[in-house]
Image (cartoon, coloured by chain):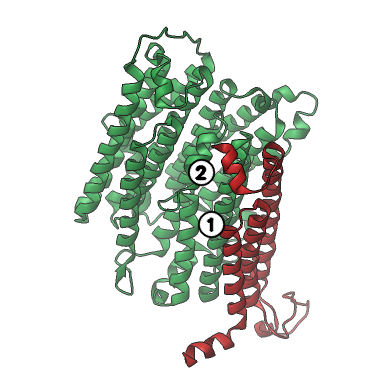
Amino acid sequence: MLELLQTLIQRPNFVVFVILFLWGIYIMAAHPNFVKKLIGLYIVQISAIFFLVAFSAKQGATVPVIMEGAAAVEPLIYANPLPHVLTVTAIVVQVATLGVSLALVAGIYRKFGTLDEDKVMEQLK
Amino acid sequence: MNSHLPILIFLVPFFVGVSMPILTAKRPSLCPDITLAAVIVMFLLAIANLYMVQTEGPIEYALGGWTAPIGIAWLNDSIAAIVVLTVTVVALLTLIYGRVIVSADLAKSVPYYTLILIMISGLVGLVFAADLFNVFVFLEVAALSGYALVGAGGGKAQVYAFRYLLLGSFGATLYLLGLGHLYVVTGTLNMADLALRLPELMTSTAVVGGLIYIFLGLSIKMALIPLHSWLPDAYTNAPSAVTPLLASTVTKVALVAWVRIEYSLIAPNVEVSHVPVLVLLEELGVIAALIGGALALIQTDLKRMFAYGGISHIGLILIGVSLGNDTGFVGGMFYLINDAVMQAALFMIAGAILYYHKARTLDDIRGVGLHTSPWLTGALIVVAVAMVGLPPTGGFFGKWNIILGALEAEHYFAVFAVIASTLLTFGYFLKVFAAWFHQTEFVEAKSIKISSGLRVSLGAISILMIALGLMSDSVVQILLESVNNGGI
């Protein structure tokens, strides 16, 4: 138990990721409101991005641009650019998802006059 | 020029799709023609690409001239070339079909055609991608246009499209997480690179966790039971004009992405805490094949029944590729190509019945006297023969190779599952035939003039199913060579 606690305290980023992830899933599953479901989905996606950012963070690192005429390349002082590129792309994908999902929600609201999933399902029956 | 074929196949639909609003600003009625022309160009390029891969061997295409570990690589091998050709053929036939079976407001909608083209380009990219992150991006490009296309049905379809979106995006997020885990451990996302570094790391919980995330994410996309719940509702309510394309390609191409990952990253006989991974995947396939078939049997809605049939076939393909030997793998891949064609044919028939006769369920079909329509009946018989898996259709040779592979691996339960799912398929086609040919009372058969576009698409897809069977030897040979050359 103590060891588990110790590992958790040593990895605060990971704990935050897990909490965000589970919180998002809970909102997605528990709320009947479509917009709230979307918020839940967004939290899950943010948690994945938080995970990518958390493991790539490096204290005191600089941008990975090698100056012309620099003598030797010291890999230790540069941040790894790849996870950041992944993050930016993943955010773009999320924005696109948000756009499509909001369009669908707007369409549902225009058609059924409600955003409550239970009421929509009743009308569908 | 030749070596740039993969990117050309991707860029043609992408650019035409994006510039569709400009191209048709003056004459919106040109949309279907431009879309069709773009897909015909793709089809010709895909044939040239397959020919090139056959003569010059597989090539790794480096995007922008940056070669693999640093740059992004696309792998253009026989399997990718064949799957891309299948996607373009199915897209072509669906577009010809969609010119006839389309609701009036969709036919005039410019975004609808843009979405179709962008989805096709996403699927092509997904097949070629040899980099985990690239797979994620194309997965989302294809899926986002897929959600919008399902939602284009309006009303009810929007609700199910939204559910599809929630589950699909959640699956994509799981995939992203898994990819992050693998990157943390290995420092690379290139599949060939990962294949070199992973085998010794299989004991790491991060690697195993990452692979599980990736598998869960992709199983939502490929609708593997029990993560299939979005599929029947979405495909039942999606617009008939585009359902053949959605049903035949989206889930199959996600499966192709998983097959690439599985084949390159998970060696046969690998065990994680005494669980043989491939056997586990195979059993998941067995469950999907059996439950999917059983669920199809109890449906009364034609489209829903076919959707569950597709879910059961995903299981069959997963059995084939997870047997750990070449025969089963080739059988699975060959069945995947067949299944793409068969699903397209099934949803074309169901969509045509819905369009002409407003018949959705088996009871409706009983009341309209469909047996007087030679084109629909002929196509249904061919597709039934192919789905059940009788020679000379391609379905037989796929199942045959899967069974041979299972016997070779001595997994008799998998053999049983393939045969049992065949019987279940036979069962639900019996139901369809009973409704199709036996009327409860005499009904005046409504004579419908089936237009030439529908005849072309139904005829071509029926011929294609038989042709795949007749050419099965050469296709299987191509796949086998590709596997033996260490391809995929």
Q: Is residue B11 left or right of residue B317?
A: right
Q: Earlier in the sequence, mark 2 or mark 1?
A: 1
Host chain of mark 1? B
Tell me: residue B21, above or below residue B207: above
Q: Which chain is green?
A: B
Name the kind of residue labelled 2 in the image. Answer: Val
Q: Is residue B271 left or right of residue A87?
A: left
Q: Which residue is mark 2?
A: B250
Helix, strand, or loop for circle 1?
Answer: helix
Q: Which residue is mark 1?
A: B171
Task: Specify whether disc 2 shares its chain with disc 1.
Answer: yes
Residue B150 found in image quarter = top right
Q: Is residue A25 left or right of residue B264?
A: right
**Which one is in front, B66 or B130?**
B130
Tell me: residue B168, above or below residue B463: below
The x, y position of residue A32, in whole percent, is 61, 53
Helix, strand, or loop for circle 2?
Answer: helix
